[in-house]
Image: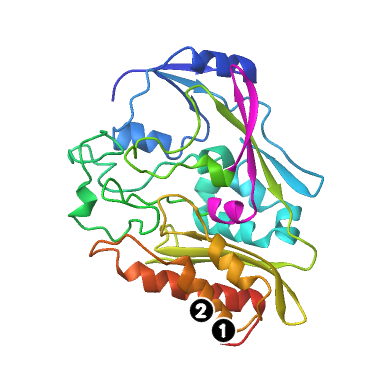
């Protein structure tokens, strides 16, 4: 590991100024992924870490039908919030499915949204071909084992999977993140925050160097809507999704009046299934509707031999989740 300077900051503006002025500086919060990338994997080597855990960004409040969550709020604190439990149940389910209690008590919401891929080729410095780590070097996952890789938003340049659970219901809800920079503040919808790999897989989101994610604004579900999060994985705990689905439905007299659907475990970014939502809205809450939505959601996948199974798995995950949320019989 390369030596680095450790600095503690207690003011948002000072933190942003410090990191913005130093191309080798990074922020440090919970560090549950960042420390792995530095110490175990050795794929990042910041020259300076600005510890932001003392910033006043730990809060959960309700305003104007939205939940305002400070970026330093822990996963456990958000999962335990009564508004989340009562009005955003699929957000709570995703938080609880996303990590062990020990990690949830350390990991922050901002850090969770910014976590890097778990692609084995990205995290292994001995693998030379990784466009995400070394732009222009190729993608070893195209030829090697690729069970934990993406089929949506992927290309021959990169099939690395976005690993998050929490981001899946958040993109379904049209959550918005607030960002502080040296030039001022801006807000970005989470659906526009993540960047498809294209021919630059190393660019993962729209953050510029030095910008600090300070808050997440999560819209509350409409009155009467039901939601759920389903994570399909190889083992029951401490495992990343092979496929996941976050769904929210408002059903009136057997017809779906409002629908939100997002997918995890299959996309290079948290995947909002808008075409599937269009099929659901105005349709009867029955099995044939759910199957049609699932078919559209996984249309035109980019697969390699190791990921082809995810097409059917993703469809089955969607159908099961929609049945569960709607209460409709199979």
Look at 41% across and 17% down and name the residue there.
23
Is residue 151 among the parts visible in the rendering? yes
Q: Residue tagged by mark 1?
A: 287
Q: Secondary structure at mark 1?
A: helix
Q: How many marks?
A: 2
Where is residue 37? Give x, y as percent.
35, 36
Residue 173 appears left or right of 128:
right
Q: Residue tagged by mark 2?
A: 291
Q: Secondary structure at mark 2?
A: helix
Front one among 234 and 328: 328
Q: Magenta span covers which residues? A: 166-189
Where is residue 129? Give x, y as percent.
19, 41
- State the quadrant of the N terminus: top left
Disc number at residue 2?
Answer: none
Is residue 106 among the parts visible in the rendering? no
Look at 68% across and 27% down and name the residue there.
56
Look at 57% across and 54% down and name the residue there.
95
- Callout 2 environment at 10 Å: few (<14), some (14 to 19), or many (20+)? some
Q: Tell me, yes or no, whether the highlighted magenta stretch contains residue 171.
A: yes
Q: Tell me, yes or no, whether the highlighted magenta stretch contains residue 56.
A: no
Where is residue 292? Give x, y as percent.
51, 77
């Amino acid at each position: 590991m390369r030596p680095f300077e450790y600095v503690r900051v207690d003011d948002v503006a000072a933190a942003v100024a410090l990191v913005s002025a130093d191309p080798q500086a990074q922020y440090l919060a919970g560090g549950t992924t960042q420390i792995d990338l530095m110490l175990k994997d050795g794929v990042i080597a910041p020259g300076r870490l600005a510890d932001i855990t003392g910033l006043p960004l730990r809060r959960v409040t309700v305003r104007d039908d939205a939940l305002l969550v400070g970026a330093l709020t822990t996963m456990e604190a958000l999962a335990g919030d009564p508004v989340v439990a009562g009005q955003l149940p699929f957000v709570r389910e995703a938080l609880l499915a996303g990590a062990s209690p020990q990690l949830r008590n350390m990991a922050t919401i901002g850090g969770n949204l910014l976590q890097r891929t778990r692609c084995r080729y990205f995290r292994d410095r001995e693998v030379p071909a990784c466009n995400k780590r070394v732009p222009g070097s190729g993608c070893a996952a195209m030829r090697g084992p690729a069970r934990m890789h993406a089929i949506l938003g992927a290309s021959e340049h990169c099939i690395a999977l976005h690993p998050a659970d929490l981001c899946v219901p958040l993109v379904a809800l049209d959550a918005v993140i607030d960002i502080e920079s040296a030039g001022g503040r801006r807000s970005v919808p989470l659906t526009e925050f993540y960047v498809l790999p294209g021919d630059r897989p190393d660019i993962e989101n729209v953050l510029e160097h030095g910008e600090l994610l300070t808050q997440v604004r999560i819209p509350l579900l409409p009155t009467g809507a039901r939601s759920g999060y389903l994570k399909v994985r190889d083992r029951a705990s401490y495992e990343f999704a092979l496929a996941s689905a976050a769904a929210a439905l408002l059903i009136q007299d057997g017809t779906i009046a409002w629908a939100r659907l997002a997918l995890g475990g299959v996309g290079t970014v948290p995947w909002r299934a808008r075409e599937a939502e269009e099929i659901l809205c105005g349709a009867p809450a029955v099995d044939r509707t759910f199957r049609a939505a699932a078919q559209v959601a996984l249309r035109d996948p980019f697969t390699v031999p190791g990921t082809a199974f995810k097409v059917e798995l993703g469809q089955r995950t969607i159908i099961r989740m929609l049945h569960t949320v709607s209460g409709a019989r199979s």
